Amino acid sequence: MVWNYEQRRVLMATAWALERPDFFVDPERVHIWGQSAGWALRHGDVYAVVMSDGHNNYRTSREGMKHAWKWGPPGGGRNWLGVNHLDYLDLARWVRDNPAIELPFWIGAPAYGTFPSHALGDFGFKPWQEFLSAMMETRRAFAATWMSNGPGDTTGVMQEMVPQIRLHQSLPAFSRGSLDARPLTDEPKGQYHPGKWDQDFQRHADKEGGTNLYLRWHTDSIADEADRWEMTVFLTTKAPADTCTVDITPRRSQKFRATPGERFKWSNTSLAGQRELQSGEVVADASGLVTLEKVVVDKSRNRIRIWR
């Protein structure tokens, strides 16, 4: 049987630290950062934020398969849940299969090494495409870049948002932003990098930028009630444009819940002059997620409201 000793050790160390009053650990702000820390996304009841690489499928990650023998026999082995361990580490599939499970806020960036040899040569880009696509399609809260040596363009999100994010607090899931680059696209932007790297990357992936790099939100004015959800969102001053459009989905809500097919009203008010920019109705999807499409967000701050 394959046991996740390393993961269990980290979970136990976390529990131990939380029980030590002399450590002054805030249980609402426990974050984990590591190259292969993506496994912690399964533990949204413990970690508020996970910062990791994006090769979250060890069946398609060259570096992951190189070390797979440390966990069990070739091709993986049954773990304590009766699941092939490599399937357990296929987080892209798990995220897609469980769209209603709430995850920690995720920041994805290559852990180390020069791009493109590390992200493409060491790991292979396919795991990045699989996982980022799964996060986008299931409307998860995250920010990511796949071209940097280390945090790169996600540094602003780490510095400005991560210290504020709390475990039992709602998150905005941004998707389909007009300022985003994408790992899968029919018309790639940026420079072509010749070499012996993945053809999927060469043909389909944007080569510059990242996803959700410039969007921020206020954590001290969130309204998360049974009958309404409100949040102030905005573009950082470093954004390459003064305004953008983006889909917004409330995630990890504590009180605001929706049933599939339920209808809501919503509005978007610019806090500069208190002008209502948008309003309408929205229907919760089959997973009970409420997504506002093509919301206008600018640097002067926007108050987003959803109510029954």
Image (cartoon, rainbow, N blue to C red):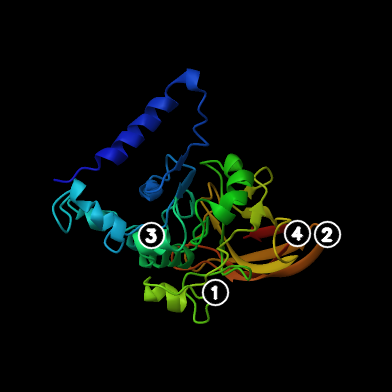
In the image, which is nearer the foreground, mark 3 or mark 1?
A: 1
- Of the numbered discs 4 and 3, the one sitting upstream in the chain is 3
Whole-Å distance between the Cαs marked 3 and 1?
A: 31 Å
The disc placed on residue 115 is none
Compared with 261, 46 (above or below) is: above
Image point (59%, 50%), residue name: 155
- The extreme right residue here reads 273
Image point (24%, 55%), residue name: 66
- Of the numbered discs 4 and 2, the one sitting upstream in the chain is 2
Q: Is residue 231 visible?
A: yes
Q: What amino acid is at disc 4? A: Lys
The disc placed on residue 274 is 2
Compared with 170, 203 (above or below) is: below
Q: What amino acid is at disc 3? A: Val
Q: What amino acid is at disc 2? A: Gln
Which residue position holds label 1? 191
Q: Secondary structure at mark 1?
A: loop
In the image, which is nearer the foreground, mark 2 or mark 3?
A: 3
The disc placed on residue 95 is 3
The disc placed on residue 299 is 4
